[in-house]
Image (cartoon, grey):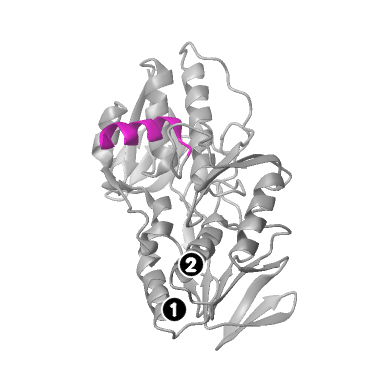
Amino acid sequence: MSSVVVAGGGVAALEFVLAARKVGEGRLSCTLVTPEAEFAYRPASVAVPFEQAQVFRFAIADIAAAAGAQLRRGRVTRVDPDGGRVVVEDGAQIEFDMLVVATGARRVPVLEGAITFRGEEDVPAIERLLADIDAGVVHRVAFAVPAGATWPLPLYELALLTAAHVAKRDRRDVQLMVVSPEEQPLGVFGGDVSATLRGLLEERGIELHLSRHPASLHGDALILVPPTTLAVDRVVCMPTARGIPIPGLPHDFEGFLPVDGYGRVSGAPNVYALGDATNHPIKQGGIAAQQADLVAQLLAHEAGAPVDMPARYSPHLMGLLLTGEEPQYLASKPTGGHGSPSTATADPLWWPGGKIAAPHLGSYLVSVRH
């Protein structure tokens, strides 16, 4: 039996341990190392200020038990790949045959003076923005995607949900704008997805400023690049992502782990990485889950389980867009940063549905909520 240490407690780590139990046929013994006690379904947080969702929480100890994994509370502070061990923050050492790093990324504010939306922790700021709109204090709101590694879909959701909020109150004096460096809205999907989103934005009266990104905010002036200025009362900006370097492992200049098409970390024997911790340009839960399933299959195959050697990673991008009315399921096969072909439909494109397309984790969450 191969011992696998899994560092992290988010989508990638939990999807991996659940997948490893299913495909490993008892040949993979996993130890999950995470400082977190709960897994929060954070993608739903975008709808919380609009009273259309809540963030459900699940005990990581229960998920680990369902995966047949040992749980070790703590944070990995150092890795010795050659020696096959990790050091936890209390000084304890855990040996491994394989290490899977799924520690996520930091969400870093990039526009001083703006409301940064990183998820659940920024729900109160969006609630205050809506209250100011309702009170007639705010009339012009820009939703901005910065340059750099980020996931823009929640920004478009915030714009659409705010437009629906404003429409219900018949506030025709409110001007909403979206600023993005993309050539088309949600350009990572492209095709039908971009066309559908563009139509929704136009229908809701949301101005679209593409091929531009925010540079600075001075009072009521939002400065963009290439140079232009928008008059605003508030700006909501997505963060950029930065890696969390772990001593003993290589990382690029932004702190991300360099991986190949099988999730193997360059220059670190028997070390794999998943999700936002890697140098993959798309930081999204569904992508992390696909990487987790591939690495679980690879390690199971190498441990002698009766599963095929997986093909190299080829992302299939899937996402759920909340619109304030009927949600849209989105899918594409990204190629060179553009999605083609792509699909946008009200019909669910994966099971179980929800914001994250993660087959093993999603199935578990559905089972414990019913």
Q: Tell me residue 37's x, y (percent).
A: 26, 47
Examine the image and state in which quarter residue 51 appears. bottom left
Q: Residue furthest bottom?
A: 219
Q: Residue at x 43, y 19 (%)?
A: 23
Q: Residue at x 53, y 34 (%)?
A: 349
Q: Which of the two residues, 266 or 203, is positioned nearer the viewer here?
A: 203
Residue 132, above or below 96: below
Q: Report how many numbered discs are placed on residues in the image.
A: 2
Which region of the structure is painted magenta? 357-370
Decide if residue 188 is in sight here.
Answer: no
Q: Residue at x 39, y 35 (%)?
A: 362
Residue 366: in magenta span: yes
Q: Tell me residue 289's x, y (percent).
A: 48, 37
- Residue 108's disc is none
- Residue 133's disc is 1
Q: The disc labelled 1 sits on which kind of residue?
A: Ile
Examine the image and state in which quarter residue 185 appears. bottom right
Q: Quadrant of the N terminus?
A: top left
Q: Tell me residue 163's x, y (percent).
A: 51, 67
How crowded pointer 1 is (Cα within 10 Å; few <14, some 14-19, many 20+) is rated as: many
- Mark 2 secondary-structure assignment: helix
Pointers 2 and 1 in contact (CB under 8 A)?
yes
- Residue 162's disc is 2
Residue 258, above or below 48: above
Secondary structure mostly seen in the magenta stretch: helix
Q: Tell me residue 247's x, y (percent).
A: 46, 50
